[in-house]
Amino acid sequence: MAVDRVLVGHKGIVCLVVAAGAEGSRYACRMCDLVTTLGDATLTLPQENADAGADASGLAQKPDSLSVDGSPPAVAVSESSPDPMAGTARLESGTAEGTATVTVADARLASQQELPSRRGRHAAERSRQPVSPVSAVTMIAATGLLLVAFAYTAGRLGHVSSPWANRAYWAGQAFILVPTAASLLGRRVLTASETVAVITVLTVAEYFAWICYSPAAFTYPDELEHWRSTVNVLQTGGLSGANYLLPISPHYPGLEEVTSALVSVTGLSLFTSGLIVAGIAHLLFIYVLFLLFREISGSHRVAGVAVLLYASNLHFASFDSMFIYQTLALPFLGLTLLAAWRLASKPPAEPRVGWLILAVLAIIVTVATHHVTSYVLVAALVLITVAALLTANWRMAAWTAVLAVLSATATVCWLVFAAPETWTYLQPFADESLQSFRDLLAGGGADVVPISAGPLADRMLSDIAVLAVSALLPVGWWQVWRRLRHQPWTVALAIGSIGWYATVAIRLAAADGSELAGRAATFVFVPAAYIAALAVGHLASAVVRRHARAVAAAVLVVVLMLLFDGLANGWPPYWERLPGSFQVAGSERSVEPEVIAAAEWTLKALGHGNRIATDVGSYPVLGSYGDQDPVRDVAYLYTSSVYTLADASRAKLQALRYIWVDQRLSQSLPASGQYFPVDPDAGKYKHPLPAADLTKFNTQPGIDRIYDSGNIVIYQLPGASHGP
């Protein structure tokens, strides 16, 4: 088969018009969606079998493309390059013969000399296409954001349990997710700029929805921890202030330093500055992730689908964009990996100093901002180095090894000289997870804190999402083995994606496994999303000729289910999906004016750093707004109607000075399943705490009531002085 004509088609994109045979020749314009990013690359059209020529991504084909004369195409064009949608294009025909090589420059020249009438037909076809889906996606997503904000407002006005408010929330999320997913997965191929725009709409819309949940102040416990650290920096001008909620925070001060600097320079409030820093960091991470996926795949469409799948991880719309130190560290992790790719991919003669400087600076910022992210960076660079050695890519192996050594050295130095307490902080979490795995391997059940399982629909959605990803990853691995096993970064991503199954095991085995698995998903979903994107493309291309529309719809449904699972089973939990009135032992809904006022009174009247017993809902408020040192293991003080000598001795050993009692603990069961930070009876409560267990301190000799707001009472234990 020979190339009969080369035209310039849609939007100036090169179109190859190929003859199907000597008799009754028909022309197939199948390249309009394949070469949008090729520039002046050479297109090679070798003889190949149709099955062997399937696109590695499966996302570049447009199965219902018409021939130039309007008849169904007799031949199909897909790519043969290991990098999807980049490199060479393949002519699929069982009887085709011959090979033709055409440069883009030659294509443009030929287009100006031949077949003006056919070119006119292409222009007419172009005029019937929509200009861009981005405007429509943006308007629909903005409408969805308004619906989400309306649902949140309804919850705050007392309609948190109303079915219509919940439906408004999900309708708004559908307005955000459905058009963005449909545009990225649709058969109309977006340009690179359109893809970036759609990704931006998705990220920004979900971030604004996150802000609308609590638009006036930080209420999430993790954000309150870093709010306290930043306040300490602003008040003291240094990092010497203790953070009783998160003691390790002053040793990783990147987020607090940047935010306090923005407050000082602009005069904005700490809340506003924190939102700006977290929002820019979150969006930058998504951009860097897109660039990295595009470099690895050679296709902006594969990169767009991979980012879309990444957005389905449980914490994309919450912890990945919170005002916490991990949020700021993530984009610098991504920048280091992008710099590693650039350093190894540049021709030997081109300068690399700029990328090397960027890599070093990004490593330093990552190490100084978040401990776990720095460890993940070292592991990722080591993994890429191993993959490069396995694929005999010596230049890549050398550069990633150098950066891995730099990252490891910086991490160890920071641990030794700046943050030696890090292991003490992380050890309880590590020990807990290891013990849970030992129990699981031994055939016993893990000591999981039994919290409400949630609505049946959420549980079903979670199970379907796990099955979907579990099925997609092996398909992606097969594609890597068949076509991409000589590419070190793709091999490294395939190996790294195995970690996704580990997160599933953690969710089932570890105590508080859902939270641990969700936080691990931030990192594990990076390779898993890319491999799943390859799988989605392959499944779409395998049956593209006969079942194109059905497959496209099925792929869209699966991806949307993953996205909705990330919202339904992520954070905030189902019992606080909508903001509302005070909720006993909740999270965000336990942060309310009366609790904040009591916490602020403790700081003013008692001074900071007092060890105080409290419940799980008031714990983050007391430690942030009150700057106190709340004690976690205090359930024994609230679960008996008598204050015994044993209780008094234990309180003395814990250096407790005050007891915080919220009378509402006797009016409702705990929303989270536990009343206290360390609760032996978590998940076992059938009735609220008896009122007598909470009021016993009123008649106890030597215990003074020093604060009473109606619902909240603070008692002073014997030996504690009243005052700063």
Image (cartoon, grey):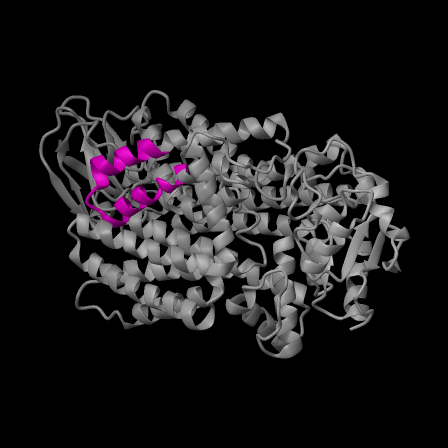
Q: Quadrant of residue 683?
A: top right
Residue 136 rendering spot, x and y as whole percentages = 55, 42
Q: Quadrant of residue 116?
A: top left
Extreme-left residue of the structure: 98
Residue 347 rendering spot, x and y as whole percentages = 19, 63
Picture residue at 44% right of the left edge, 48% below the top: 194
Picture residue at 82% right of the left edge, 38% below the top: 690
In the picture, the quarter occupied by the C terminus is bottom right
Question: Residue 666 versus residue 692: which sits nearer the camera?
Answer: 692
Question: Residue 600 versus residue 303: which sits nearer the camera?
Answer: 600
Residue 287 rendering spot, x and y as whole percentages = 44, 55
Evaluate whether residue 215 shows in this view: no
Magenta-drawn stretch contains 643: no
Magenta-colored span: 473-501
Evaluate whether residue 478 shows in this view: yes
Magenta-drawn stretch contains 494: yes
Q: Tell me which secondary structure the magenta stretch mostly adopts.
A: helix
In the rendered view, tell whether residue 414 sits above or below residue 567.
below
